[in-house]
Image (cartoon, grey):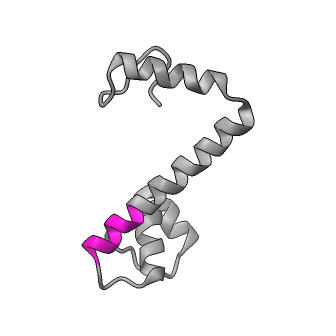
Amino acid sequence: MPPAGRTPLDTTPEAHAVQTEAYRRVGGAERLAIHFRLTTMARDLATAGIRHRHPEYDDGRIRLAYARLVFGDELTRAAWPDAELVDP
């Protein structure tokens, strides 16, 4: 979500106001559940894109490519010092 008061570029101001109000009405536990669902969906979409671009990658290479995409080269190398960096 963009900073407070800013509408996302892919959303009308009216739709953003409705979404913001809906988030305010639900409790913290539900907002957290929504966050986890959206995070899972984003990860699944990213890994599907990696699989599409690199059908030759096995699951381990998919994880490395995803880590590189999300965390960057430095953290990926720190977590997997012996693994080669693969293209996301």
Would residue 45 appear left or right of 37 to someone viewing this image? left
Residue 51 lies in magenta, yes or no?
Answer: yes
Apparent side of residue 29 relative to residue 79 in the rendered image (left or right): right
Q: Residue at x 25, y 71 (%)?
A: 53
For residue 10, say whether it is visible.
Answer: yes
Q: Nearer the viewer, residue 79 or 5?
A: 5
Name the residue: 32% across, 21% down: 12
Q: Quadrant of the C terminus?
A: bottom left
Identify the residue at image location x=51%, y=82%: 82
The span shown in magenta is 46-54
Which of the two residues, 50 or 87, is positioned nearer the viewer here? 50
Total labels drawn: 0
Residue 10 percent location from the top left of the image: 30, 31
Q: Is residue 85 above or below residue 9?
A: below
Q: In this rendering, would 35 be left or right of 63? A: right
Q: How far across and down, in percent of the image, does residue 65 sit?
A: 40, 69
The image shows residue 38, relative to residue 14, as above or below, that is below
